[in-house]
Structure formats: C-alpha cells, structure tokens
Image: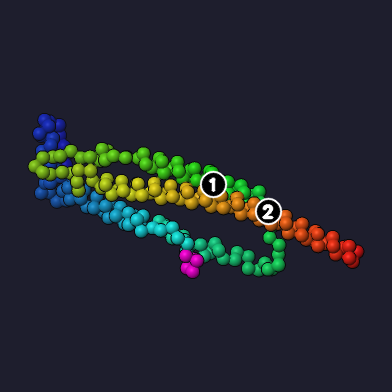
Amino acid sequence: MTITSGSTEHVLGQVRTALYGRQENCLQDALEGDEGVCISMLQVAQRHFESGTTVYNAEQKSYSTVFTLKPGNIRGDTAPATASDVDIKVEFDRLRKAGSIFADELSRDLHDIAGSLREILPTSSALERPEIGGGMGIGIGWTGPWDLWNANRILLAEALEKTAGQVAGVGDYLISASNFLERQDAAAKEALEQAGAELDGQFG
C-alpha cells in the first residue's frame, strides 16, 4: 500500500488503514507476528541468563554458566602414547605472562565491552511508536519488545563483568601457581644437587 502526502489527518488515516485494514495480511498482523517471535526469543535468552550458574561439576566434567562448556576433551590425554616417565618442562615466565594477559588485558577488554553494552539504547526512546488514535497502536505496544531486550542487555553486561572478574582471578592464580612451581622446582634441584654431592663424596 502506498501512503500519499496530505494533511496530518489524511496521512494518519492511511497509516491506520495499512495497519488495521481488512485486506489480507494487514501490516499490524505481520508486525505482531514478527515482534511476538522476537519476544519469545528474548524470553528464552532471559531464562538462560537468570538460571545460569557458574559451577564446575567435577563428576560430570562440565562447567556450567550462561553458556555451557564441556571440557572433557580438553582434560583428556592428548598424547596417550607418551611414556609416563617423560619429564615435563614448565616455562615459568610464559606461564606468568599468560596469567598477566588473563588478569590484565582480557579482563580489561571484557569490562570495556560490558561498559559499551550498557550505553547501547539505555532508554526506549528509539523504539517508541506514535499513537494512531482510537486506542490503536503500532505492533505489540508503544515501545515494542524493548523491555525484554533491555533486561537481556543488562543481564549480558552483568555476565561480562562477572566473567571479567573470574578471568582476572584465573590470571592471578596462574601467576601464583607459576611462582610456587618455580620455587618448588628450585628447591627440588637444590636437594638433588646436594644428594648428588653427598653420593660423590661417599662413592667418588
């Protein structure tokens, strides 16, 4: 349907006809159908956010959060043919660097993304529709699916901020673990050298 120019009343009349006219597949029905699907998707997303917990289940080898990661393959032996007595070399500086990237860079990026998300359409003004008169509106309501979209926007920002804190914690743990392992490694080497020197003294 083409809407032609004219007075305000004339244009509104044409819009009303397009939305609520008796013609087949009137625009209002199509809008309500499309926005109804959108609302259903947003409701599902919101339920996922609100029921999501951050818990590692050791028995099921699953890490449950808003999204679910099953790290069973990651935890599995990637080199089953390797002999069990092969020494494992830990590069402590690389481990500390990885921890620093987690604690500083990745965590900061996630915080920045969450901050940017909070600034996207913080009010419903961009989605507000004009009233047509006679108690009729456009689509499913004055602001469409904005309320549900906004709830998901806030929940996603909160999830990102929570993840940023967890990532920072993982980074700090990697750094601490690296320092601890390095001290243990140095102590083990010293003890081994001392034992070797004693053996040399006794049997050398």
Q: How many marks?
A: 2
Q: Residue furthest top?
A: 7
**Residue 113 percent location from the top left of the image:** 43, 43
| Label 2 secondary element | helix
Instruction: Give the amino acid type for the residue marked by disc 2 in the picture.
Output: Glu
Residue 173 belongs to the span the image colors magenta: no
Residue 73 is left or right of residue 39, and the answer is: right
Which quadrant: the C terminus? bottom right
* Mark-to-mark CA distance, 1 and 2: 20 Å
Q: Which residues are magenta?
A: 57-61
| Label 1 secondary element | helix
Per the image, the residue denoted by label 1 is: 103
Q: Which mark is residue 119?
A: none
Between 147 and 190, the one lying in front of the other is: 190
Per the image, the residue denoted by label 2 is: 182
Residue 77 is left or right of residue 2, and the answer is: right
Q: Residue at x 58, y 52 (%)?
A: 174
Instruction: Give the amino acid type for the residue marked by disc 1 in the picture.
Output: Ala
Q: Would residue 14 be seen by someone viewing this image from the given angle?
A: no
Q: Residue at x 16, y 42 (%)?
A: 1
Residue 150 is left or right of residue 180, and the answer is: left
**Residue 28 percent location from the top left of the image:** 17, 47
